[in-house]
Image (cartoon, rainbow, N blue to C red):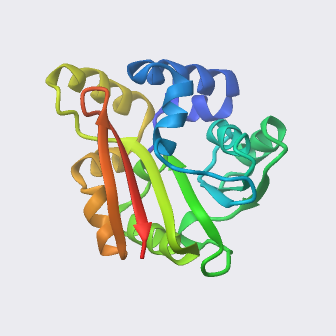
Amino acid sequence: MATILRDLSYRYQRLYDGISQLAALSVGGEARLRQLPLTGLTIAPGMTVLDLCCGSGQATQVLVQTGAQVTGLDASPRSLQRAQHNVPQATYVEAFAEAMPFADGYFDLVHTSAAMHEMETDQLRQVFNQVHRVLKPGGIFTLADFHQPTNPLFLPSVALFLWLFETETAWQWLRSDAAQLLIDAGFQVVQQQLFAGGSLQVVQAQRS
């Protein structure tokens, strides 16, 4: 069940943006947060990139600046309207992440940020299988999302944020092993890095 603050944050763009900016302070600000999943990756003009669960387009904006052909996918019409307004250079598709309407091996790179924690475990498996399907051989899937804090000082702030803005799936995500789920889907995990006292993880995985 969604909290009242979660519903309000998705209804009002300024509130959502403010929450995103506040949460990003732990890693040095929103600009750095959006760059973390792309660290070490080469995105050349003309590459096909999917921004999975793109929301209102904060990360999509970063991706289009590389010159890549960016597609944003989200199941929320409201979010896609905002993304189209914010980042008109990208192409947008309304669909569920676990049933993507793309051909096999279509994308060079799939990116997602702060979205996988909204999925049930069975959904995650479906999504990761779909990402594996739509990636070209050798393509990269990069994700940034919550992680169980390794520094106890970060536990209260993460718990408060989840209680106020997230659902039970976020707690399930903290107890899950993202790297192992990716391996189960056929990926090779290239790296997994932790930030903000271990409360944020960035995982990059390659399709063989």
- In the rendered image of this protein, does residue 158 appear above or below residue 201? above
Q: Give left or right: position of 138 versus 95.
A: left
Q: Position of residue 195 (x, y in %)?
A: 32, 32
| Image x and y of residue 32, in percent | 51, 27
Nearer to me, 48 or 163: 48
Please give the count of numbered marks on the rendered protein: 0
Q: Left or right of 47: which side holds 171?
A: left
Is residue 208 visible in this depiction of the protein?
yes
- Furthest toward the bottom, the residue is 104
Q: Residue at x 47, y 53 (%)?
A: 142
Q: Residue at horizontal 44%, vertical 52%?
A: 116
Q: Is residue 47 left or right of residue 172?
A: right
Q: Is residue 89 above or below residue 190?
A: above
Q: Is residue 37 above or below residue 31?
A: below
Q: Nearer the viewer, residue 8 or 52?
A: 52
Where residue 188 sits in the image (x, y, percent)?
A: 34, 68
Residue 107 located left or right of residue 193? right
Residue 135 found in image quarter: bottom right
The quadrant of the picture occupied by the C terminus is: bottom left
| Residue under the image location 68 percent in, 27 percent down | 12
Residue at left 73%, top 53%?
A: 45
Location of residue 126 in the rendering, given as x and y in whole percent from the top left corner: 44, 72
Res. 114 visible in picture: no
Indicate the quadrant where residue 48 lies.
bottom right
For residue 28, which quarter of the picture?
A: top left
Answer above or below: position of 46 versus 16.
Answer: below
**In this orientation, which residue lies closer to the viewer: 40 or 3?**
40
